[in-house]
Amino acid sequence: MSNSNPFQAEAVQNYAQKCCVALVLDTSGSMDGQGISQLNQGIQAFFDEIRNDTANLGQKLEIGVITFDTTVERICEPKLAEFIDLPALAAQGSTRMVDGVREGINMVRQRKDWYKSTGQRYYRPWIIMITDGAPDDDQKGHLMALASEIQQGMEKKEFCFMAIGVDGAEVSVLQTISNSEIPPRMISGLKFAAFFKWLSSTIADVAKGQSVSDAVNGNAWDGGFTV
């Protein structure tokens, strides 16, 4: 990670206890068509859910968005939902999954450092990776190292990591990089809107003091979700 923090000059919007969520999204060519369309709709539904939340989640939850295809791009740095104007995602290229997740880890660590430097309290951040396939061949050799990074980060309570697969995803890859506290999940039928509704509810429960494992496993999943 670079010694310079991209957020160091940013002004604090409010001093509510923050929770950073990094969405790490597969925008490779296999997501073209209904996949990318439903993902775009689901993300907007997620933002709407947060903006309309009656428990003030909109003042606490900061969302960043990273896409990975042939390249990795931070298309939205962490910010409150009311300030997000996300361009529509487009599908193209290959699947730099490992690089994408590592950029998600980098993002939440930088955001935590900024919280500390500006005197803001914060909850454990979340990294949510959504994919419909497997990483590029030259990325597969780095999966175990990534899994170790995630395991250590989870054990130290640096962040929560959740791997989400949609139709076509390699479950074995998701299992390799996931921690037992938050096992990987599959979404059938491209039900992204339902997933993001569940996600906002789960994060809200953790913010209220519920344990991560209880919140993840205790909330009812829509019928489109399977282990």
Image: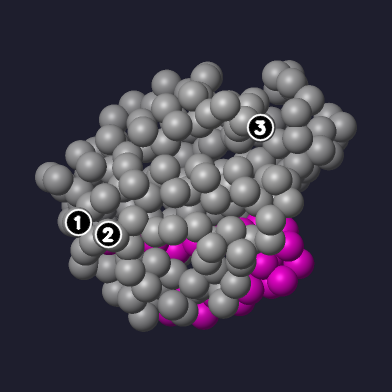
Question: Circle 1 sits in a helix, a strand or a loop, which is it?
Answer: helix
Compared with residue 14, is residue 49 higher up or lower down, i.e. above or below? below
- State which tag comes first along the sequence, 1 or 2: 1
Say which mark, if any, is on residue 24. none
Identify which residue is drawn at 32% across, 42% down: 193
Task: Tell which of 64 and 197 is nearer to you.
Answer: 197
Residue 66 placement (x, y as % from top left): 45, 44
What separation in Å lies between label 3 and label 1 (alpha carbons)? 31 Å
**In the rendered structure, which amino acid carries the disc numbered 3?**
Lys
Identify the residue shown where x is 70% and y is 45%: 208
Magenta extent? 141-166
What residue is shown with label 1?
189
Residue 183 placement, left or right of 89:
right
Q: Which residue is mark 3?
A: 60
Q: Could you tell me which residue is drawn at 34 percent across and 47 percent down?
A: 194
Give how far across and how far down residue 54 sits, in percent: 57, 27
Q: Residue at x 42, y 36 (%)?
A: 46
Numbered disc 2: secondary structure: loop
Label 2 sits on residue: 224
Query: Is 145 contained in the magenta span?
Result: yes
* Amino acid on which the number 1 mark rests in the picture: Gly
List x then y, in percent, for residue 134.
Answer: 30, 69
